[in-house]
Image (tube, helix red, strand yellow):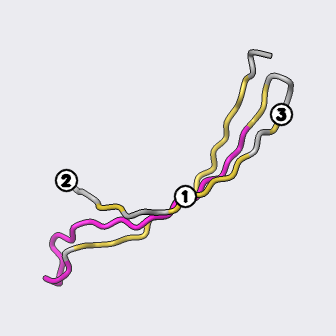
Amino acid sequence: MVASDRDLGFQGAVGLDIPLTSEFSISPALRYQAWTAAWPSEGSASPEATEFEQEVRGLALDLGLKLRVIR
């Protein structure tokens, strides 16, 4: 089992609502996330290295479809 110790990070997002008809619209969005994660360094060649840190980044494109049923 692997446990990580995540630090504070950054997340930003931007999105739109594009109407297609009076009932339907699409909602694309773009998200970016970044943080540093640390894991125990088991079996390391260096005895003083007890932790492995890695910067984790992600970019996601979301696409939503909205249906309005109440006017």
Q: Nearer the viewer, mark 1 or mark 2?
A: 1
* Residue at mark 1: 11
| Disc 1: CA contacts within 10 A as few (<14), some (14-19) or many (>=20) | few
- Residue at 75% in and 36% down: 26
* Residue span colored magenta: 27-49
The residue at the far top in this view is 70
Give percent across and percent down for residue 23.
Answer: 80, 22
Mark 1 or 2 closer to N-term? 2
- Is the stretch drawn in magenta largely helix, strand or loop? strand
Three-letter code for the amino acid on which mark 3 is drawn: Pro
Give percent across and percent down for residue 39.
Answer: 27, 65
Q: Secondary structure at mark 1?
A: strand
Mark 3 or 2 closer to N-term? 2
Do tag 3 and tag 2 residues touch (Cβ < 8 Å)? no
Q: Is residue 40 magenta?
A: yes
Numbered badge on residue 1: 2
* Residue at mark 3: 19
Three-letter code for the amino acid on which mark 2 is drawn: Met
Dividing the picture into quadrants, the one containing residue 70 is top right
Q: Is residue 38 magenta?
A: yes
Q: Secondary structure at mark 2?
A: loop
Q: Give the CA separation, mark 1 to mark 2.
A: 27 Å
Q: Give the CA separation, mark 3 to mark 2.
A: 47 Å
Q: How many marks?
A: 3
Residue 7 against residue 48 in the figure, above or below? above
